[in-house]
Amino acid sequence: MDSVVLESVSKVFRHHPALFNWMGRERGGETRALDEFSLTVSTGKVLVLLGPNGSGKTTTLKLVSTMLLPDAGRVLVEGADTRTASNRVRRHVGFAVATERSFFPRLSARENLDFFAALDDVPRKSRARQIEAMLDRTGLLDAADTLVMKFSSGMYQRLGIARALIKEPSVILLDEPTRSLDPASAAHFWNLVRGLSAQNSTVILATHSFNEAAAVGDLLAVLHRGRLAAYRNIGDSSVEELRSFYFQTTGELDEAHLASRSGR
Amino acid sequence: MKLAQLLDKTAAIVRRDLLTAIRYRTGFLITAAGTAAELAAFYYLSRAIGPGFRPDGVDYFPFLLVGTGFYTFLVMGINAFLGIVQEAQQTGTLEILMTTSTPAPVLVFLSAISAFAGNTVQLLFYLGAGLLLFGAPLHANLPGCVVIFALSLTIAVAIGILAAALQLAIQKGSALVWMLGSGAWFMTGTLFPVATLPLPLRVVAELIPITHSLDGMRLALLQAADWPVLARQIAILALFSLILLPFSLAVFSYTLRRARLQGTLSFY
């Protein structure tokens, strides 16, 4: 069964310069973030989105989460349209955003999770237990009662993952989830994602890491300039195969690879 | 949404606001000291003016006490809506809050209830301190006070939702609160009776709902006015509530949808 469907989705951001623009040099115009973009993710699969900066990965995640609405086309989550049934969609989706700035700084990790869990209708009876378990799974149990304004980037990232999972969503969106994590924490997190998939949750993960794509992905979508440049199974593909496929698809120069070949 | 869920969400929001407020320790103390200083200033101002000045037939200090206390309560409540959206934009929580299972209007509404609860405590402290420390005489029609309070609150909620919508649309909802804080302030009879204003300003004052809130609250709280005396203020406030509340909710839903389409939810 299809869990997430994007049908010919387009998204354009328009920029209006300031009223007295002669004082600055702000540019007007528009950015076409997604252009006639279509994608389907089956239940229980982990889809990895790869693409250069500005290719539309985060926009795709935001559209699925209802943070954004499409200009054209439609987005369906568990059969519900994000335009017409956004409340239903939000019950199914958990989103770990890339930014650190998404928590209440003067609340502790536990208090933040408790607040968001209440808004997500996590039953009061089991909430404390679920929060405890989630803090444990993300390695934050020791910092559970620390105000989050004292957190490091990696801790914010782990807390963001905990928040996305606390309501046990059927669709999980992860935006560069291991960007600030140390290698051991990243490996631990990849196991967590595989576990979610085994429990039949659908995961869409945006990343720049080929290691991550190879470690957790079932499917790979390469985005380039707001369009779907390639879509394939990951299967047992190695990191090197994914890297080479990505650079062939996007037409970008793999400078790191060239440097290693030339011995620098 | 079930009632139990709604109460659970309200409790979570009140708890968040309370914890955040008490963790700004010095801010809490400064607010209390500022309130006491303001009361003292009004008390000595009214003594300097002398007992001969009795606006609307009451002593000047209680007139000031109710006017400034209730006006501040309403404007701070309106400001709270704006603050909720503004703070959520600045802390980056707005986008993520909009992806929770709680619909946005419910979220803003519950957040405002929490803010108004805090402001109500402040108002009671203000009136209580005026009464105990400076001996302001009260002769109250309590049910009348409750009705005026509830209607004024509804109007403040509606204006607050409009300010929040303006903040979402142009990131400058503070303009509306600024208008109330400066332009409307002297026309609503906070410090002196509206009757002393020139006719054109009196007409404008009649169109500002807060004028009728202050009038009604003074009549009910200081003069124990009966229902027939309060009827005009109650009718006007009820009419404003009926018009403003659905209008503001419609405007908020429209601006929220527009922000989602334009991708400007997190702009500030």
Image (tube, grey):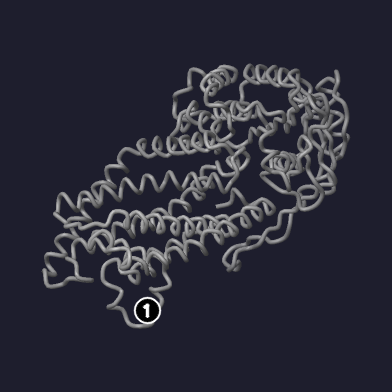
Please name whichever residue, A39 or A21, is drawn nearer the observer in this view of the structure. Answer: A39
Q: Residues within 10 Å of mark 1 (few under 14, many from 20)?
A: some
Q: Secondary structure at mark 1?
A: helix
Chain bearing tag 1 is B
Q: Which residue does the image show at 44% across and 46% down from the upper left? A: B113
**Circle 1 sits on which residue?**
B201
Residue B233 at x, y percent in the picture:
37, 67
The answer, for residue A101, to whether it is visible in the render is yes
- Mark 1 residue type: Leu
* In the image: residue B137, left or right of residue A103: left
Identify which residue is drawn at 35% across, 83% down: B199
Q: Is residue A116 left or right of residue B235?
A: right
Please tell me whether residue A20 is drawn above or below residue A111 in the rendered image: below
Which sits in the foreground, B199 or B83? Answer: B199
Number of numbered discs on residues:
1
Residue A62 in the image: x percent, y percent?
69, 42
Can the viewer see residue A175 in this picture?
Answer: no
Q: In this view of the protein, which residue sits in the foreground, B21 or B159?
A: B159
Q: Is residue A254 left or right of residue A100?
A: right
